[in-house]
Image (cartoon, helix red, strand yellow):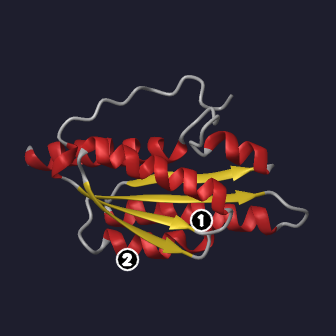
Amino acid sequence: MSGAGAPAIAIEGGAELKVAVVAAQWHTQVMDGLVAGAEKALAEIGAAHDLIRVPGSFELPVVARALAGAGYDAVVALGVVIRGGTPHFEFVCAAATDGLNRVALDTGTPIGFGLLTCDTEEQALERAGLAGSREDKGREAVEAAVATALVLKKIEAKR
């Protein structure tokens, strides 16, 4: 299982943050699980958040960039791409991954990487945070983004 060895992330002070969640719409069942996991984690942390939907995973970076520039402390990007019989999978996965990384580095805004890149729908469902899923990648993406935002705030406070 890919989640083996995942750290337990303790988050203190997240209620002061404003977080944006940008989520693709393809693969409704998987996306519903990812979004629910993200929103549940944000509610537990107490962070204010907005949910923005985009057509697909390819559109995540451009909207994440706009959100990073709009004053959010962190952006959580959620999507899923499932391998098919054409190179489309590789192109979308590479573009979305590289784009989200570029947004984080160019803006200094943490991006929670909740983009599932799976060979099968079953693999995606196992990671979607649904009842019976073994992992909750929506929650994990929130925890990573919020924890990183808090680290950056501590660094900034020491300047």
Quarter of the image with the N terminus is: top right
* Rendering coords of residue 108 (x, y %): 31, 60
Seen at 27% across and 74% down, the residue is: 70
Residue tagged 1: 96
Circle on res. 54: none
**Circle 2: element type:** helix
Seen at 45% across and 26% down, the residue is: 7
Quick check: marks 2 and 1 in contact, CB under 8 Å?
Answer: no
Residue 20 against residue 137 in the figure, above or below: below
Seen at 56% across and 42% down, the residue is: 129
* Rendering coords of residue 49 (x, y %): 30, 60
Amino acid type, residue under disc 2 in the picture? Ala
**Circle 1: element type:** helix
Q: Residue furthest right?
A: 85
Q: Is residue 148 left or right of residue 21?
A: left
Circle 1 Cα neighbour tier, 10 Å, few/some/many (<14 / 14–19 / ≥20): many
Q: Residue furthest front?
A: 131
Distance from the alpha carbon under mark 2 to that under mark 1: 15 Å
- Asked whether 151 or 18 is in front, the reply is 18
Residue tagged 2: 66
* Rendering coords of residue 138 (x, y %): 49, 48
